[in-house]
Amino acid sequence: MKTITTTDEKKIITLVQKEITDVSKQQITKVKNEDDLVIAKQLLSNIKTAREGYKTRIEDEIIKPIKKSLRSLQDFWKPFTTSLDDLEKEQKGSIGVYVDDQEEKRIEKERKQADKIQKKIEEGGDAEKEIEKLQDIRETIPDVQRRVNRVVKVVDEKLIPKKYWIIDMVALRRDAVTNGLEVPGAVVEDETIIVNG
């Protein structure tokens, strides 16, 4: 695996900057006749070549090796991180089951204690000790940090308003332009643009 050094990157960037600067120094031609048109077209061709050159060079000599190194590192660590993720998920699940079970038991104890308090009050007795016991029951919550995540689940796609839909322009263009299909709500128009070279 080749690692790009800062020196390599600086050399590539310097070369690319020189190529772009050379093209940038060329003067824009006001097209007034056929000779000007030829010069202007040549400038567009030079711009296109410079742009493709620097993009290719940066992609091939800097970005691709970095991506390859990153993928290699991710592949190396994936078994470890996956194992840790699975272990964490399983452990959190186990804790969650226990905490939920304890919460159910606490609620049941609370309900029974509230019934005792109600019965004492109806009998005209002193419910102070029973109220203290209720408070003690309420304080027996397992010491585990929890949070509630609010998630949205789609239960019926047909009822979701249109403003939440995203138009797939690639598929739309492929069907309408390439395959010649009529797509309701879309039209195919010809747009003239100037191309390089």
Image (cartoon, rainbow, N blue to C red):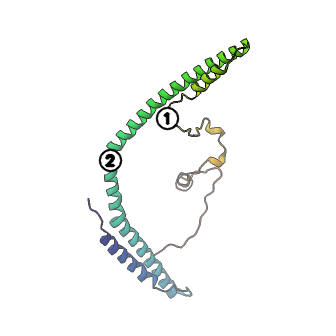
Q: Could you say which is closer to the camera, residue 192 or residue 55?
A: 55
* Residue occupying the point 59% across, 23% down: 107
User: The disc labelled 2 sits on which kind of residue?
Assistant: Trp
Whichever of callouts 1 and 2 sits on the residue coming sooner in the sequence is: 2
Q: Position of residue 10 (x, y in %)?
A: 34, 73
Quick check: 99 left or right of 52?
right
Q: Position of residue 97 (x, y in %)?
A: 48, 27
Q: Position of residue 94 (x, y in %)?
A: 44, 29
| Above or below 32: residue 130 | above
Residue 81 falls in image quadrant: top left
* Residue occupying the point 47% across, 78% down: 44
Q: Position of residue 95 (x, y in %)?
A: 45, 31
Q: Could you say which is closer to the camera, residue 56 or residue 34?
A: 56
Q: Could you say which is closer to the camera, residue 28 or residue 40?
A: 28
Tag 2 secondary structure: helix
Query: Residue 77 — which label?
Result: 2
Q: Which residue sits furthest top?
A: 123
| Above or below 76: residue 159 | above
Quick check: 92 left or right of 181?
left
User: The disc labelled 1 sits on which kind of residue?
Assistant: Val
Q: Could you say which is closer to the camera, residue 91 or residue 113?
A: 113
Q: Residues within 10 Å of mark 2 (few under 14, many from 20)?
A: few
| Above or below 179: residue 82 | above
